[in-house]
Amino acid sequence: MTDQDAVAERKMQFLFALRSKGVTDPAVLTAMEKVDRGPFVRGLFSERAYEDTPLPIACGQTISQPSVVGLMTQALDVTPRDSVLEVGTGSGYQAAILSQLARRVYTVERHRRLVREAKGVFDSLGLVNVTSFLSDGSFGLPDQAPFDRIIVTAAAEDPPGPLLAQLKIGGIMVVPVGQSDAVQSLIRVRRTESGFDYDELRSVRFVPLVEGVARETE
């Protein structure tokens, strides 16, 4: 088998795994086929980049398993006109997927090292519609609000009020909620003229949403 054949087979297995977990939206599958997860996984775990499993990254964080990234992206229902806020850049993989679907992606991270490393990957991939910020994501980005879509990749006890306030009427937010890392639910919030509608999508496990910007040593 040539290297080209191996890559093609790996992509086919990757997409099959996504579909088998419920990722069926053609636009999301196309985006995930185009964005290689490899550059977002470093060090000892780089050989496992194409497995459907979460993996450790720097600063005690994780890169979510691809099927969860796909399901969250699918639930967000992004259109090419949308402005999207991501809270929790992490490796940058989720933002890179969103960049293929949205007009503009703003991504916020509290760890300086993760912002720096993710930005390096965005630049290497030519993702000009992604803007990274070192900031406390629980407060969103008031200067860029309102947003058509908001995605939170860390678990809060409840959907954060500042983020709800920055969601456009008609907008969608996808956020994991739960009081412990053992019991969390992925919630989709739709903002209406009269308030917010909530749908529970599935059980998940994410790192907690922490307030404040991390010290450089974290």
Image: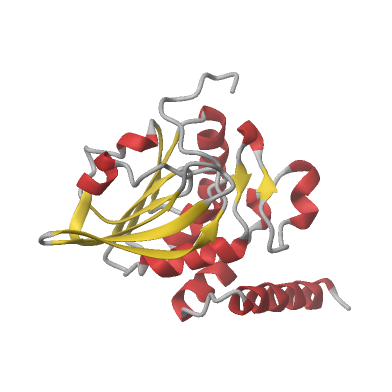
Residue 147: x %, y % from top left: 25, 53
Residue 174: x and y in percent read 38, 57
Task: Judge left or right: residue 11 versus residue 213.
Answer: right
Specify the quadrant that holds the C terminus: top right
How many dots with numbers?
Answer: 0
Q: Where is residue 53 in the image (x, y as percent from the top left)?
A: 69, 58
Q: Which residue is drawn at 55% across and 62% down?
A: 68
Residue 29 falls left or right of residue 196: right
Residue in the foreground of this view, choosing between 177 and 8? 177
Furthest-left residue in this view = 193
Between 169 and 82, the residue placed more toward the observer is 169
In the displayed structure, would residue 91 be above or below residue 49?
above
Residue sitting at the far right: 1
Rendered image coloring scheme: secondary structure
Res 8 quadrant in image: bottom right
Horizontal side, residue 163 vs residue 132: left or right: left
The residue lying at 55 percent from left, 53 percent from top is: 93
Quarter in which the N terminus is drawn: bottom right
The picture places residue 163, in percent across and down from the top left corner, at: 28, 44
Q: Can residue 126 be seen in this view?
A: no
Choose between 5 and 84: the one closer to the eye: 84
Residue 68 visible in the snapshot:
yes
Residue occupying image coordinates x 10% and y 61% = 193
